């Protein structure tokens, strides 16, 4: 615990420096991080290869390996993502609103850093770079704790991050990495490290998020599982429906924005259902369906009640026929995780009803659920998709890693 408390104290001191840093200095640090990632690509890939070998030996699933594995392309993508973050406007100091009171007081609401952010994540080593850059961009220091399976690559990425910070003159303590696989370190972070941590962000599976929410003594930005839905309305364009469903499910099955359930309007099922099922099956996706879906194709496996609430993160999808928009919304409210849900329809009224009635963090019309991504939203990157209702929802980018304060300017006013 003493080591973790020291980590917290260093992070708090670095946060004070970052809070005063000019935007150009923060951007220079992030660009230097990107350059260091490219320069150290071989070391990162070597460490990741060891992580992958160990995960395979431990019998981890292919979906897990997909989240864990890095390549030259993914490291280049990481570096490009950091450059995109650096190119974003500095959220710190942004005046969101200002007004003058009758007594002459001038009031402004101004974005400021949160302070120290603890980020606990599992098998995605690339989160290390994204989290570091976004926290620095928002003027925060970060304490990163990665799952043991990704420890080697994450440690190598963190070394590159520190190279970037050092080259730009910002404190390397601004991004600290908890290198121990000891689970007690997570407990120490959840306890707040003696008041050093202001916010915890978990990024991982249901068990991790549940533990964080149950034990954290500091605020949490919850990133819950992505039980994402695509609803095909009776007025859907068949070609759009096929493309969107296939992309939503099969582009990358291991990401949180991958569709896990397909809902089809009963009024259009005779035309739309069988071709959609066929497209999925021919793409190598296992389909688990209700009786009407099974009747549409003999290869469909019977869906259980548990299937409707399962995040597969694999080439598996559950399919159900529902009674219009109301039926789709009722199903999503009962089984969804308030992450990302899409409607495919040419009926604007139906689209409006779906988008209004659902309170998921991201709702889409005629677009793939795999657009649930900070980069695709123009944020440069994201730490996760927040599914809670306070402070941040949807992709958590640099702006969402700030809070605000009121700056009030007067000229001698006193209150009567």
Image (cartoon, helix red, strand yellow):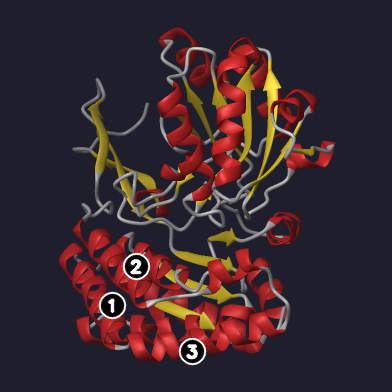
| Quadrant assignment, res 231 | top right
Residue 270 visible in the picture: yes
Dot 2: within a 10 Å radius of its alpha carbon, few (fewer than 14), some, or many (20 or more) residues?
many
Q: Secondary structure at mark 1?
A: helix
Q: Kindly identify the residue that appears in the image at 22 percent across and 78 percent down.
A: 32
Q: Residue furthest front?
A: 298
* Alpha carbon separation for disc pair 1 and 3: 18 Å
Asked whether the viewer can see residue 359, the reply is no
Tag shown at residue 33? 1
Q: Position of residue 343 (x, y in %)?
A: 50, 24
Dot 2 corresponds to which residue? 133
Question: Residue drawn at (58%, 13%), measured in percent from left and top?
Answer: 268
> Is 334 above or below relative to 354?
below
Q: In which quadrant is the C terminus drawn?
A: top left
> Which numbered disc, 1 or 3, marks the residue that appears first in the sequence?
1
What residue do we see at 41% from left, 28% from top?
Answer: 240
On the image, the x and y values in percent for residue 18 come to 31, 70
Say if mark 2 contacts mark 1, CB within 8 Å: yes
Residue 267 in the image: state x and y as whole percent.
Answer: 62, 9
First in sequence: mark 2 vs mark 1: 1
Q: Are marks 2 and 3 in contact (CB under 8 Å)?
A: no
From this view, report whether residue 121 is shown above or below residue 371.
Answer: below
Instruction: Identify the residue shown where x is 23% and y is 55%.
Output: 90
Q: Is residue 325 left or right of residue 48?
A: right
Left or right? Give the position of 384 relative to 185: left
Q: Nearer the viewer, residue 113 or 395?
A: 395
- The label on residue 47 is 3
- Helix, strand or loop at label 3? It is helix
Element carrying mark 2: helix
Given residues 330 and 410, the one toward you in this image is 330
- Distance, label 2 to label 3, CA atoms, is 21 Å
Residue 290 sits in quarter: top right
């Amino acid at each position: 615990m003493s080591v973790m408390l020291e980590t917290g104290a260093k992070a708090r001191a670095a946060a004070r420096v970052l809070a005063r840093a000019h935007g150009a200095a923060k951007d220079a640090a992030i660009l230097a991080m990107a350059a260091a990632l490219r320069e150290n690509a071989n070391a990162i890939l070597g460490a990741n290869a060891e992580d992958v070998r160990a995960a395979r030996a431990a019998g981890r699933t292919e979906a897990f390996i997909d989240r864990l594995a890095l390549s030259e392309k993914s490291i280049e993508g990481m570096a490009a993502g950091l450059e995109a973050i650096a190119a974003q406007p500095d959220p710190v100091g942004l005046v969101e609103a200002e007004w003058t009171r009758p007594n002459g007081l001038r009031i402004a609401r101004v974005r400021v850093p949160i302070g120290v952010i603890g980020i606990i994540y599992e098998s995605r080593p690339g989160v290390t770079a994204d989290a570091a850059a976004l926290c620095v961009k928002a003027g925060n220091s970060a304490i990163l704790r990665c799952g043991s399976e990704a420890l080697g690559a994450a440690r190598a990425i963190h070394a590159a991050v520190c190279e970037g910070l050092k080259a730009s003159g910002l404190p390397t303590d601004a991004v600290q990495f908890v290198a121990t696989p000891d689970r007690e370190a997570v407990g120490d972070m959840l306890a707040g490290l003696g008041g050093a941590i202001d916010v915890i962000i978990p990024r991982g599976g249901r068990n991790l998020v549940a533990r964080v929410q149950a034990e954290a003594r500091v605020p949490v930005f919850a990133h819950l599982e992505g039980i994402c839905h695509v609803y095909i309305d009776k007025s859907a364009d068949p070609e759009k429906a096929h493309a969107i469903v296939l992309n939503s499910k099969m582009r990358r099955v291991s990401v949180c924005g991958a569709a896990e359930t397909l809902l089809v309007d009963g009024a259009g099922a005779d035309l739309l259902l069988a071709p959609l099922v066929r497209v999925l099956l021919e793409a190598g996706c296992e389909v688990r369906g209700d009786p009407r879906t099974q009747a549409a194709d003999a290869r469909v496996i019977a869906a259980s009640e548990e299937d409707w609430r399962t995040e597969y993160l694999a080439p598996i999808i559950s399919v159900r026929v529902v009674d219009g928009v109301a039926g789709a919304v009722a199903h999503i409210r009962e089984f969804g995780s308030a992450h990302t849900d899409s409607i495919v329809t040419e009926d604007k009224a139906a689209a409006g009803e779906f988008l209004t009635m659902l309170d998921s963090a991201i709702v889409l019309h005629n677009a793939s659920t795999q657009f649930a991504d900070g980069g695709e939203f123009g944020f440069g990157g994201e730490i996760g998709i927040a599914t809670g209702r306070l402070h941040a929802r949807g992709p958590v980018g640099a702006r969402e890693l700030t809070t605000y304060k009121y700056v009030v300017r007067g000229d001698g006013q006193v209150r009567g």
